[in-house]
Amino acid sequence: MKRFLFLLTLSACSAGERPLQFNLGNEAVQLDWNRSLDSTSAVILDNVMEGLTSYADSLHGPRAELLRPLPALASSWSVSEEGRVYLFHLRSGVFWSDGVELTAQHFVDSWRRLLDPATGSSNSYQLLEIVNAAAYAAGRLRDFSKVGVRALDPYTLEVRLRRAVPYFLHLVASPSTFPIRQDLIERFGEQWVEPGNLVTLGPYRISHWNQGEEIVLRAYPGYYGEKPKISTVICRMIAEPLTAYTFYENGELDILPRDLPPSYARALLSHPDYRSGPKLAVNFLLFNVHRAPFNLAANRRAFVQAMSRPELSSFFEGAQTPVKSWIPPGMLGHDPTLGIEAEGRVSKELAGKPLVLRFSGNDTWNLVFQSMQRTMAEKLQLKSKLEPLEAREFTKLLSQLTGPARPRSETLPHLMLVGWVADYPDPHSFMNIFTSSSENNYMGWKNARYDELVEKAVSTAEEASRRHYYHEAQKLLLETEAVLMPLFLNSHQALVRSSLSGVHLNVLDKWYFQKVEFAESGWNGLGRGILQRLKARRTSSPGSS
């Protein structure tokens, strides 16, 4: 009865008042875009800010080759000196939300801060192809004027690269490269990202942030481009899939972008709002190579061989695909024959060794690791301890692993669950993170031969050569050294209200709200949709066969 009265109330509202309701999934949001690491924060940042380029208008297909960076804050650009010099021409008349006009210096300030060792950003690797950027990031060069980026005038940014980088236009679409207001950072310090202090220039502004509950975005009237179709977006923070699904069915969410409840997974395939598609994302176990027993490659291989990926993936009811290789399908260098088979092999090499496995995730991941714990006891005679972390705690741990005050190896867990989503649709986004200089190399594994192979792969444009180098590098990473255990390919499994248009699933897991709109009239369409679902649920439940 209450639900029926609720629907009547909604129907009385005008069409223009209906907000878009999106589930972020957790509360670990980092609004400092130079430092932000996670896809949850990227949803907010991609809608309140912009970079030199963007994908907002180009998400017309799910494959990597369909993603093309388009002009955003840069209206155009030119490339010279065999791909090593970029001139970006900024749009005039772009204003921050406090009325200050955007200039090229705001990009220079941002990139200086991103590369500054004192910032401790693990995203600095995205700019290391710029002349002298690596030396500045390592602290060997203190004069930033010698780094290959400068403002030629208020509307022209010059970038000099040490070599041609085919994916550079993708890098400048990343949140970590967005412009900043150095004057506000100096004024507010670390508090510059607080909603009352934060100044942005994207299609939306943060109107309200209820910690742990929701972030409310409202259209920014001073935005230079096309105004958002929907003026208000409510981004909820519901971590548990079943709870989020209940919100969706009750009309309190319009987009459930990920983590559908596994117990409903197969039934949801026939849900009228169900959408799926590939994503350049892999979940994997990362070994602490500096802590016994995983300081030995033989022990790491024995662990992988004892597991069963299909058994572990069964808890997700088809939502996760087992994988043993590293570069995902659809990318140059993907080879499903690489990697170690996880075949439930019994081994006594690790018998009696105590292990700690640290992870962050929902209840389903808890079941996965409880199963893994049983396997460790049965197949390896290992004593293991599970340490689940809240999303915010895990994000803090990753930040510590990339910062100047890195924890000692012996204080870190033996195993850690990590997920990686490509920053750009090129295999280097996956291979680069295990190079010796990468700040995303969380456990600090170093191998000169691996570094050499990855460097050779990125230094040539010839596909056959790149494929060869990546094959050899992956073989070293996954088989010889067994630095990680790939677990699952992470694909899009989403619910999107059928009355919405302008929603695109893409391989980089980008979510732009600017052109999303309700096809049906306001709240009336929502009311009809919920009534239809209530009728359907009288005869069948989502978990029924």
Image: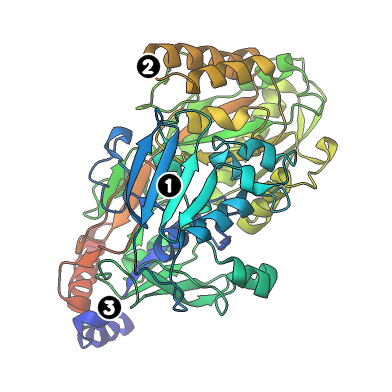
Q: Which mark is residue 18?
A: 3
Is 537 displayed left or right of 163 in the figure?
left
Dividing the picture into quarters, in which one does residue 501 lie?
A: bottom left
From the viewer's side, name the closer residue of 466 and 37. Answer: 466
Distance between the Cα atoms at labels 1 and 2?
Answer: 39 Å
Residue at x 46% of width, y 46% of height: 158
Residue for badge 2: 463
Amino acid at dot 1: Pro
**Eyeballing the image, is 453 above or below 37?**
above
Dividing the picture into quarters, in which one does residue 447 lie?
A: top right
Residue for badge 1: 262
Q: Residues within 10 Å of mark 3 (few under 14, many from 20)?
A: some
Mark 3 or mark 1: which is in front? Answer: 3
Q: Sequence-wise, which precedes: disc 1 or disc 2?
A: 1
Amino acid at dot 2: Glu
Q: Sequence-wise, which precedes: disc 3 or disc 1?
A: 3
Residue 157: % across, % down: 45, 51
